[in-house]
Each structure stands twice: as C-alpha cells, then as structure tokens.
Amino acid sequence: MKTTFDGTMQPLDRTVPDPALIVLIGAAGSGKSTWASTWPSTQVLELDQFRAMVSDEAGDQSATLSAVNVMHTVLEARLARKRTTVIDATNTEERVRADLVQMARNYGVPTVAFLVSTPASVCVERQADRSPDRAVPEGVVRRQHADAVAALPHLRSEGFDHVVFADSIHRLEPLLKRASDTRCRELGWDGGDGLGGLLLVRRTFGAEVLPLWHWRDRSPIAGGDRVGEIRLGPDRMVLALRTDVDGEGDVGFDLLVGCPYDDECDAPAWQPVFSVTDLWKAHTSGTGRHPDAVCSLHGGPDDVDQEADDHNQDDDPEGRADLEEQFAAAVRE
C-alpha cells in the first residue's frame, strides 16, 4: 500500500476532518470543481461564482479583488458557525493560502490543503472546451501548475493541519449518497409526494421551469390529453402532454399557438416542443410558422384543404365549431 507522496517522501495523509476549511489547490482545468461537487453545494465557495456575482462575468479578472472580499465575508460567517467549507479556486499563491489559514485559525477550525495534481498538459487541453470568458491562457495555466508543485513541500509549514492528494481521498460515496437521496425525494421513495407528473416536465424543460408549471386537469382544450401551463405574471404558455406521439407510444409536449395558416382563424393550433430552447424560440418568434404546427381546423402543412376558414358547420363535419370558444377559454384560465 502506498504510504508516501511520490517524489516527496512525505507521509500520506487522508484526514479530512469535519468541520474543516478545505483549500483546493491546482491549476485552472485540473478538475477542482469536480472534486468540490462531492461536497454539498452549500459548503462550496467558488471564486468564479463570486466574480459573476459582482460583475456578471465569471471570468472577469478585474473583479477578482471584489469577489475575494465578498467570498471572505461568507467564509468568516461559516467559520464562526464551525461549518465545513471548501474553497474552489486555484489557490496557488502563498499569500492567498496564508489569508485562508489565518482566518481558519481565528475561529479554531482545522485546515486541509487538498491538492489536485492533474498534469499541466491536461489542464491546458481542457481550456479548449471552455467558453472564451472562462478559458485561461496556456502560460498562466502552466505557471499555476508549477506554483502548486513548488508549494507542496511547504504546505505544512504554512500552517495547514492536513495535506492530502485528491487521488488518495474517497469521495465517490458521499456524492452518490447525496444523488440517491435527491432521486428518492423526486420519486417519492422517501415517503413524500415526489415530483410525480413534474418529472417529465423537468426532464424536458429543466428545473427552472418547475416553479412556473401548473397542471390544468380536466381541461378540454387538448382533446382529452393532459394540459399544463407555464405562468409568470401576464405571460402564459399552454402545453399538452401527448402520450402516444405518431401512434408509436412516444411521449412529448405540444405548445398551444395561433393558427399558422389563417390569421382570422381562432381554432387551437399545436406545435411540438422538445426543450426549453423551443419554448424560448416560440415565445419570442411572434407569429412565425412552425413547420410541424397543426391547426385543429385547418390541419397541418401536408393537408390538401387549407381553405376551410369560413368556420361554419358545413366546413366542420366533425363538429368542431366550439373550438374557438375552447381556445379562448384555455387562454382565459
């Protein structure tokens, strides 16, 4: 069994007490945020998020000082309550680490230097996958990596109570346990109600939509299919849950829209939506025709008769003359 850090002959330390101040150390792209995610999100203070808070740009380096000041305020509040806190930043500069160690000492909280020792070449390669505002220049990444390597022999003398390598710490179990607990709550396996019908809504449109979603049970607007609504202030989007798309048993959502074939038609029309991006496009595109939109009266783009716009009983052999009122009622609800 390995008992020392390679190349240093330092005893292998796997101690991460609770509470503790855990200072991640590694170059940009080393995977620090992945390791940080193994702790509850409330315990993680990520410098990029604080940059975004004060400047709207996570990669705005000019906002670093302001971001650090805000982060330290939150950190002090947590240390005063003896709460485990993870600092997700490069932390490759000694003065930065010194400030963190001193703050922890002030509140009697043990400190852990948590080294993420990913090769410099890998850290550099990962920058290519980042957005331009988050990518770090190669020279900066390599300097951070060199600084982290140089710091290793001195971390104990800097005041850290524990010095650990990420690769020697088992963090998968707490991550899986937290994910399992969340899933059990969503499915109602913990004895609660769970998300129920909202599971499909979240899977399709994302968690941000859930607080805005309301089911309209017994609504007749969708021919018996279940109807839901996204509602925020004066904005409304009405959707139908289709459980047998194309007769093949597939499940999906259609969005209630105006007739795309006749401006004077008041019958309900539906167009498929597969993601929150589709909702956004539909909400901002005005009256543009969707290629797969189907009007309850005129049919779809492949129907031969697109001229049945008199809306009388002769043009309505299937008894759909009340669709105009159904559409108006759906919007009024």
Image: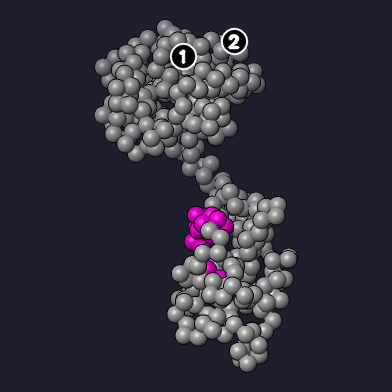
Amino acid at the residue labelled 2? Asn
Magenta stretch, residue numbers: 269-284
- The residue identified by callout 1 is 96
- Label 2 residue SS: helix
The quadrant the C terminus occupies is bottom right
- The residue identified by callout 2 is 106
Amino acid at the residue labelled 1? Val
Relative side of 311 to 141, left or right: right
The quadrant the N terminus occupies is top left
Q: Image point 61% across, 76% down: which residue?
A: 265
Mark 2–mark 1 distance (CA, rounded to whole Å):
16 Å
- Foreground mark, 2 or 1, reads 1
- Label 1 residue SS: helix
Q: Image point 29% across, 22% down: which residue?
A: 139
- Asked if the magenta segment contains residue 261, the reply would be no
Relative side of 233 to 207, left or right: right
Badge number at residue 309: none
1 and 240: which one is in front?
240
